[in-house]
Image (tube, grey):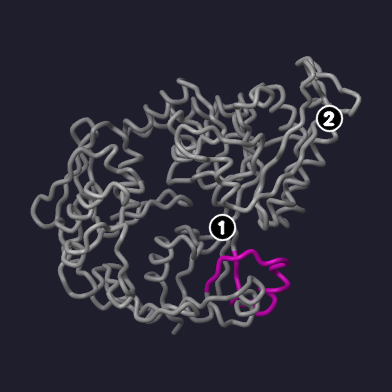
Amino acid sequence: MFYFDSVTGKTFNLLGKSYTFSNGNKTLTVNLQTNAKWSDGVKFTAQDVVFTFNELKKYPAADTNSVWSQLESVKAVGSSKVVFTFKTVDIPFAEQYVLGSTYIVPEHEWKSLGDPTQVKLPWQKAIGTGPFKLVSFSPQMYTFEANKLYYGGVPKVQYVKYPAYTSNQAADLALASGQIDWSGIDIPDIEKTYVSADPKHNHYYFAAGSVVEMYPNFNNPLLSQLPVREAMNFAIDRNVIQSKGETGYSQLPVPTSLIPSQMSWSDPNLQDSKSFSVNDAKAIQILEKAGFRRDRHGIFAKNGKELSFQLLTVTGWSDWDEDALLIKQQLQKIGIDINVVQQQFSAYYNLINPGAGLKPHYDLALSWTNEGPTPYTIYYDMLDSKGNFNIEQYRNPAVDASLNQFAGTTNLAQQRQALYRVESIVTQQLLVIPIFDGELWYEYNDAKFTGWPTKNNLWINPAPYTFQSAAIIMDHLKPVQ
């Protein structure tokens, strides 16, 4: 119904026109588009929304966002208004998962299909309400055309084609030669291999999308000690990682783990929140003060336990693999031993996040953060006791209370104060160790179309693989006259 952009913090109206909270923020009322139609011509109504949510309740396996863990009821008021009632107050959850991540399906098509998790529709029967509709599909290419029934007006782009390539190299060549207008891939030496092929029209901008962290597993009694994490932090040279591992494309992180577009949420009075420094001597001093001494292997140890850890990364993620090797070299200089372990993604993910109630099996891991329209998302997922990506197994009632306060109000001043308390704990306790701000890969050619997000006007997440923003961008593009 809405799209909440993680890069700009903006809200884009889709099937919803507006929404309000009431009843102590337990009731959410959504006003829907009144002129929307499904691409088969049937009118879209509030009954489609209610049907969709009731299907998720009827078939819990389809409720992948667990919306009914928070919802109490969903009711239509007429044909263009829906009222959601929640069991508890959680505004970010209501916005991001109920309004922003639940895709509405047409009741007239789905009511006879049964369990949604078992449905297999041929592409010819795919219908929607968005600016484009699917008109052909094959493993090599699928094509959309402008939806003439789109409530926002017929898009100026008539066709959108998605070709498949067997490798990044093949895609690089097609992009540089002008066969592709828009892409999101990591291109080595991009100025030479892409921009120089057509400097007037070939552009790119790799905005920071999410922070890549080195996560410590707090179940490890050595990593749960702050001096160990502090020493690691002082020894990691992020400038080297940025220039070598990330080939200069990434941005340097900040201790609060805020991405550049969310720095307005940063506590202006928080000390040491703006940048990191490298100081091997201080790192060694911290370890010695904490009672660690070098053993015969040159590794710091205490009570017979060496500071020797495995650092987990993903096989084939070449930049991360290089980053991990650089971290190994940097920590070796201060007497901390690192063994880099590369795993296929499925094995990697099972080790860091095996499921609710199960303990992760890793020491250190390079991994992403889950960004949202405000820093609440990253902090909740990463640090809250019930967080969706608390792979470090951190527990702190003070953090939980602050995040609960944020989630329970729409008052901006109260939300800021809640996040300021979390930021203070994050920077002082080094709960995670930011390594770099991960790139949103984005290349575009403006020879044929205008309206692209640019570095000077980044009005939305520009990456083509962020499919909600991609549809919005394509709807905004206009052919060059």
Position of 282 with respect to 28 (left or right) is right
**Crowd band around label 2 with a 10 angstrom C-alpha radius: few (<14), some (14–19), many (20+):** many
| Number of numbered tags placed on the structure image | 2
Which residue does the image show at 77% across and 47% down from the upper left?
325
Q: Amino acid at mark 1?
A: Leu
**Crowd band around label 1 with a 10 angstrom C-alpha radius: few (<14), some (14–19), many (20+):** many
Q: Nearer the viewer, residue 457 or 149?
A: 149
Q: Which residue is mark 2?
A: 335
The x, y position of residue 259, in whole percent, is 55, 44
Comparing labels 2 and 1, the label whose residue is closer to the camera = 2
Position of 272 with respect to 328 (left or right) is left
Answer whether labels 2 and 1 touch (C-beta < 8 Å).
no
Which residue does the image show at 32% across and 74% down from the upper left?
122
Position of 207 with respect to 96 (left or right) is right
Q: From this viewpoint, which residue is outermost toward the bottom?
A: 481
On whether residue 201 falls in the magenta region, the answer is yes
Q: Quadrant of residue 271?
A: top right
Q: Which residue is mark 1?
A: 440
Q: From this viewpoint, which residue is outermost toward the left?
A: 78
Q: Amino acid at mark 2?
A: Gly
Position of 184 with respect to 89 (left or right) is right
Q: Tag 1's secondary structure?
A: loop
Label 2 to label 1: alpha-carbon separation: 35 Å
Q: Nearer the viewer, residue 192 or 55?
A: 55
Q: Is residue 272 above or below residue 302?
A: below
Q: Is residue 383 above or below residue 157?
A: above
Give, as a single range, the part of the protein colored magenta: 182-204
